[in-house]
Each structure stands twice: as C-alpha cells, then as structure tokens.
Image: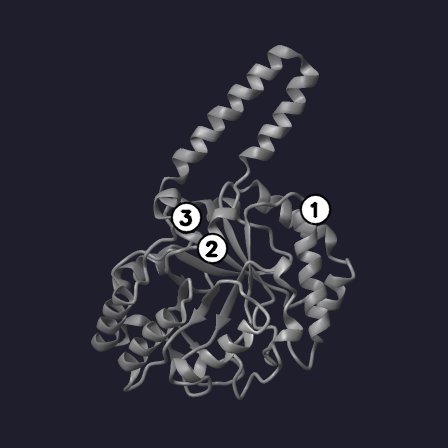
C-alpha cells in the first residue's frame, strides 16, 4: 500500500474531478436528478479503508501525547530510526472535536493517523446507555468529512486497573456495550474511513483480567492492538511479554495484530531488548509496531522511565539495524 498511500492526493484529485463531472452532467438532466446523483457521488468519494484492513507489510510508528500538528516527534523519530514513521498515534480526550486539518496534515506527509480516544471523565455505562450520543454523532461527522484514513482506539488498556474505565471501576460488559455504541453510531453516520483498533494491555502480573470478556467481537474490530513495555514490571523478553497474550487473543480473534504501543526502558540491556522485540514481533507476524518515544513516569508509580530510541549509541544502532532486518518500516501495501 506504499504507492496507494503516498499517491493519495492524486487519487483524491481524480475523485474530485469525477464528482464535479457527474454533478454537472446530472444538473443538465434536471434539478431532481442532479441532486440525487450529487449525493451518490459524495458518498462514493468518501475515503474507504477496506483495502487497508489486511496489510501485507509491517509498519513502523511513533506515539506521544502531542497533537497531530506538533510534528517534532515525527522529525526526531525519522532522524533516529533512519526513516519516517508510517503511523503517528496520539491521544484525544472524550468530548474533544476531531482535528480534521491536523490529521490530513499527517496523512499528506505519509503517516496513518491513529487516535486513542480516552474516556477519562465519562463512564462507560453512560456511553453505553446513549447519554453521549450527541457527542459521538458530532465526532463521527467530523471524522467522516476528513478525506483520509483514521485508526481509532477507544478506551485503550481497558484491562488495566490504573485506568478509570478499567477493573475496579467498570465491568467488561460496560466496555463492550460502550464500544459497540460508539461503533454503531459511527456506522449509522456512514463513516467508512475508520480502522477500529481494540487495544488491551498485555496480560501480566499487574494486569490479570481475562481478555475475552472485553472483546466486542470480530464484527466490531478490525485490528487487535497490544500495549506492552520492556521494563521492570511488564517483562524483558518477547516470549514472556507478548507471546502469552498473543496466544490468548488467537483463541477468540483472527484479526491482524498491531503492537500499538511499546518501548524499551533505558538500562544496561536496552540494545539486546530492542533486538529481541523486533525479532519476536517479526516472528509473530504482527502488522506493525508503534514506539513510545518519551521519558515518562511508569503508570501508577513514581519511577521515571526513558523509552526514547536515542538514549545510547548501542540502542540507536540496534533499533536501526533490527527494524530494517526484521522488515519493519515498510509502508502498508494493498493485497
């Protein structure tokens, strides 16, 4: 999909010319016929993500908490990783409007935007009951009007007890019902440009909740996106950090798997852990890996972790060599 994505502005231009031609032709035939054909042409011109749902390549992405317009993370990542990212993930709070121009900016510059929608001030039960439908409809309309794809993650790490929508705060049934409510409203609004990414945290000693009760079903999910970090809590090997969760997910879903958020904490073995991450991910057949390139406190704790690529010459070299050797950093291709 490298060619399709990088040439997307050209395709969009062709579609716009076609829409204008059809509208003009139908207008000559009569106002009623012109209105109907114009509506059909507008629907046809909406971006379709169907060809992106089963990518044959492996993407390399970057995530941080800055808005799409704050492009510094992409510039830094490009310099350190040795190539521009294919995915740029960011966070958006529940109630915020969709930044169509910012996401279009990312898409024009070669990044698939991925928005992690965080319902920190709204309960899942309320969302499921429809109290937030007005906001969901507004958001869906804004996303539909954006001429490009969006990978959308809702209430990520729903199995993490540190989140206000996780265990101890909400039931798995609440999450599933809220997810379906958001998805159904988007569908009713005619949204065709969203890739739905279900993003649990990997199952480990601090995240023990069973995953299957949180799964909305294959009809509501396009990609499974796993979140896990090489550090003092999650684990220091792909075989213990990601493999057990991959096996559990495979029992109830055959959807493509994206490592939606990961990083390796600074330490004496960081280069070795980076090599293990890319080799393990490639062997597991994931469709991509999104790197968290920041320094930040560990969730629920007060220990500052440095996940950045360039913390040492060895880590930088390991990232560049292993990402290339394992086939990451190649844009998606249409099957």
**Which SS class for mark 2?**
loop
The spot of residue 256 in percent (x, y) is: 49, 62
Report if the CB atoms under discs 1 and 2 are less than 8 Å apart. no
- Looking at the image, is 253 positioned above or below residue 269? above
Nearest-to-viewer mark from 1 and 2 = 2
127 or 24, which is in the foreground? 24
Say which residue label 2 marks.
54
Distance from the alpha carbon under mark 1 to that under mark 3: 27 Å
Instruction: Identify which residue is drawn at 30% across, 71% down.
Output: 309
Disc 1 target residue = 188
Disc with the residue nearer the chain's start (1 vs 3): 1
| Crowd rating for badge 3 (residues with CA inside 10 Å; few <14, some 14–19, many 20+) | some
Q: Which of marks 1 and 2 is nearer the N terminus?
A: 2
Would you name the residue on which mark 3 appears? 334
The picture places residue 75, in percent across and down from the top left corner, at: 31, 57
What x and y, as percent, mark residue 185? 70, 51
For image coordinates 49% across by 73% down, the residue present is 227
């Amino acid at each position: 999909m490298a060619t399709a994505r990088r040439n997307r502005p050209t395709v969009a231009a062709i579609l716009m010319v076609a829409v204008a031609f059809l509208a003009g032709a139908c207008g000559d035939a009569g106002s009623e016929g012109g209105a109907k054909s114009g509506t059909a042409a507008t629907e046809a011109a909406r971006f379709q993500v169907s060809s992106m749902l089963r990518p044959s390549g492996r993407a390399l992405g970057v995530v941080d908490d800055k808005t799409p317009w704050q492009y510094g993370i992409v510039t830094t990542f490009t310099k350190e990783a040795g190539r521009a990212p294919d995915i740029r993930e960011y966070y958006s709070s529940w109630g915020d409007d969709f930044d169509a121009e910012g996401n279009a900016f990312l898409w024009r510059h070669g990044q698939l935007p991925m928005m992690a929608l965080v319902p920190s001030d709204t309960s899942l039960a309320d969302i499921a009951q429809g109290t937030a439908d007005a906001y969901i409809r507004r958001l869906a309309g804004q996303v539909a009007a954006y001429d490009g794809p969006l990978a959308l993650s809702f209430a990520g790490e729903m199995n993490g007890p540190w989140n206000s929508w996780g265990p101890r705060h909400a039931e798995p049934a609440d999450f599933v019902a809220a997810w379906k409510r958001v998805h159904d409203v988007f569908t009713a609004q005619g949204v065709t440009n969203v890739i739905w990414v279900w993003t649990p945290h990997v199952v480990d000693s601090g995240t023990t909740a069973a995953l299957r009760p949180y799964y909305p079903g294959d009809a509501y999910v396009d990609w499974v996106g796993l979140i896990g970090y090489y550090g003092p809590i999650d684990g220091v090997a792909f075989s213990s950090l990601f493999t057990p969760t991959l096996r559990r997910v495979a029992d109830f879903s055959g959807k493509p798997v994206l490592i939606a958020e990961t990083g390796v904490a600074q330490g004496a073995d960081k280069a070795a852990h980076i090599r293990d991450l890319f080799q393990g991910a490639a062997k597991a057949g994931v469709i991509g890996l999104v790197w968290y390139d920041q320094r930040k406190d560990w969730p629920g704790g007060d220990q500052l972790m440095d996940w950045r690529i360039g913390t040492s010459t060895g880590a930088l070299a390991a990232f560049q060599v292993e990402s290339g050797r394992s086939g990451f950093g190649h844009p998606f291709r249409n099957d």
